[in-house]
């Protein structure tokens, strides 16, 4: 770092002072000499790693001082040097420069990194600005425990965006170890306190993805007084693995998140959330995560497809091609669904469309293409 500071100082010393040509310099020789002397002393201190001197050099070049011309690029060099050494105000100036594109190409991720640095050095406003940029998706990394703590603080204060941002980080393990339980709690809080549709969807998805667990119903105590008397837990007791010495009659494997997960997904789907509609429909059609219900499943898939959901369109095409969920096989409907899925960028739809087209006669193909064009005209495409 001192080498970089020394190079920056040499460059600073070689830059011209404010003012006109040689004639103007001769007319004000003493003031210019004094300004140059002050500048040289400041640059020398900065070159030794004095972060306050580096910060002052940055200020001088930012606005023009100590007889220097303003130079945003050089100012940024000094701010980054001082900021890296632990000067909070310099880190703030570096963040502002990157955010405004002053002396450097505008880079909100880099700005976020400097806001983060300033925040770790104790600047509360820097922390708040970093949280905003992170939530807006402009910052690419959580940064570590400090970032988690700042998001958590904002979430505890009731900030919906912070709740969702922190839950997403914890769910995906983005820069920190994943914590599904904590993510689920934050989504639940956002759904209950704010009625957020996205939170309802994510909570439902997480609950539906909960792995199967074991219970021993015969040994569970559902009488509160008896549970207290026997010092047993009240209600259901879940085991992540099959209990030892438990035969099939006394231990059962269940999916604990199915019922609640369906309720939250349905709540989001009814409010028009396309991904919730698709997931609910796909689960009902498959009959794996949720009980099989082809009629309701197709209805939810169609609701998502109307909103242009590519996977829902592909799923409906597959169902129509197989005659599942419809009265019979319907190659025309399948072709139309595949064609619309292709328009939405679904990778596997083209091969599926070509495959179904091989078995269609000329009349069916013409009808399918006509329907596709009518739908495109209706959508203004």
Image: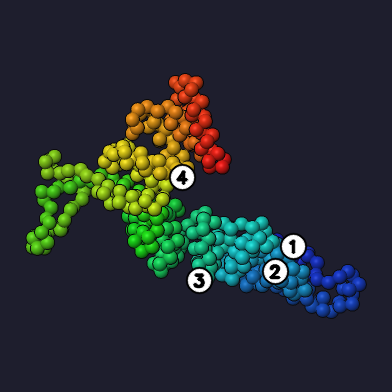
Question: Which residue: 69% across, 61% down?
Answer: 103
* Viewer-proximal residue among 205 and 233: 205
Q: Quadrant location of residue 227?
A: bottom left
In front of the other: label 1 or label 4?
4
Q: Which of pointers 1 and 2 lies earlier in the amino acid sequence?
A: 1
**What residue is shown with label 3?**
124
Instruction: Tell me if I can see residue 57 in this picture.
Output: no
Q: Looking at the image, is 290 positioned above or below residue 7?
A: above
In front of the other: label 4 or label 2?
4
In front of the other: label 1 or label 2?
2
Number of the label disc, if any, that sits on residue 307: 4
Q: Which of pointers 3 and 2 lies earlier in the amino acid sequence?
A: 2
Number of the label disc, if any, that sits on residue 62: 2
Indicate the colouring scheme: rainbow
Query: Do callouts 3 and 1 mark residues in contact (Cβ within 8 Å)?
Result: no
| Mark 2 residue crowding within 10 angstroms, few (<14) / some (14–19) / many (20+) | many
């Amino acid at each position: 770092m001192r080498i970089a500071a020394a190079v920056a100082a040499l460059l600073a010393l070689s830059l011209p002072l404010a003012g006109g040509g040689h004639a103007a310099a001769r007319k004000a020789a003493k003031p210019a000499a004094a300004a140059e002397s002050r500048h040289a002393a400041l640059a020398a201190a900065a070159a030794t790693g004095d972060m306050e001197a580096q910060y002052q050099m940055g200020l001088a070049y930012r606005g023009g001082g100590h007889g220097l011309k303003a130079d945003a690029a050089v100012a940024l060099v000094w701010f980054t040097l001082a900021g890296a050494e632990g000067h909070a105000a310099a880190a703030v100036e570096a963040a502002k420069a990157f955010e405004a594109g002053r002396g450097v190409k505008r880079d909100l991720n880099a700005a976020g990194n400097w806001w983060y640095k300033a925040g770790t050095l104790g600047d509360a406003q820097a922390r708040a600005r970093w949280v905003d940029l992170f939530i807006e998706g402009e910052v690419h990394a959580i940064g570590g425990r400090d970032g988690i703590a700042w998001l958590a603080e904002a979430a505890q204060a009731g900030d919906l965006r912070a709740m969702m941002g922190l839950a997403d980080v914890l769910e995906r393990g983005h820069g920190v170890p994943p914590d599904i339980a904590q993510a689920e709690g934050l989504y639940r809080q956002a759904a209950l306190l704010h009625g957020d549709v996205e939170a309802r969807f994510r909570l439902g998805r997480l609950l539906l993805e909960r792995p199967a667990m074991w219970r021993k119903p015969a040994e569970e105590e559902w009488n509160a007084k008896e549970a207290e008397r026997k010092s047993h837990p009240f209600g259901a007791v879940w085991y992540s693995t099959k209990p030892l010495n438990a035969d099939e009659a006394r231990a059962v494997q269940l999916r604990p998140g199915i019922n609640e997960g369906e309720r939250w997904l349905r709540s989001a789907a009814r409010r028009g959330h396309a991904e919730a509609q698709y997931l609910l429909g796909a689960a009902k059609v498959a009959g794996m995560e949720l009980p099989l219900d082809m009629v309701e499943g197709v209805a939810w898939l169609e609701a998502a497809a109307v909103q242009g959901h590519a996977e829902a369109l592909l799923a409906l095409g597959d169902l129509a091609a197989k005659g599942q969920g419809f009265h019979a096989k319907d190659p025309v409907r399948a072709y139309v669904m595949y064609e619309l899925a292709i328009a939405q960028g679904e990778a596997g739809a083209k091969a599926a469309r070509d495959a179904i087209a091989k078995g269609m006669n000329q009349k069916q193909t013409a009808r399918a293409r006509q329907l596709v064009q009518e739908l495109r005209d209706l959508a203004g495409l």
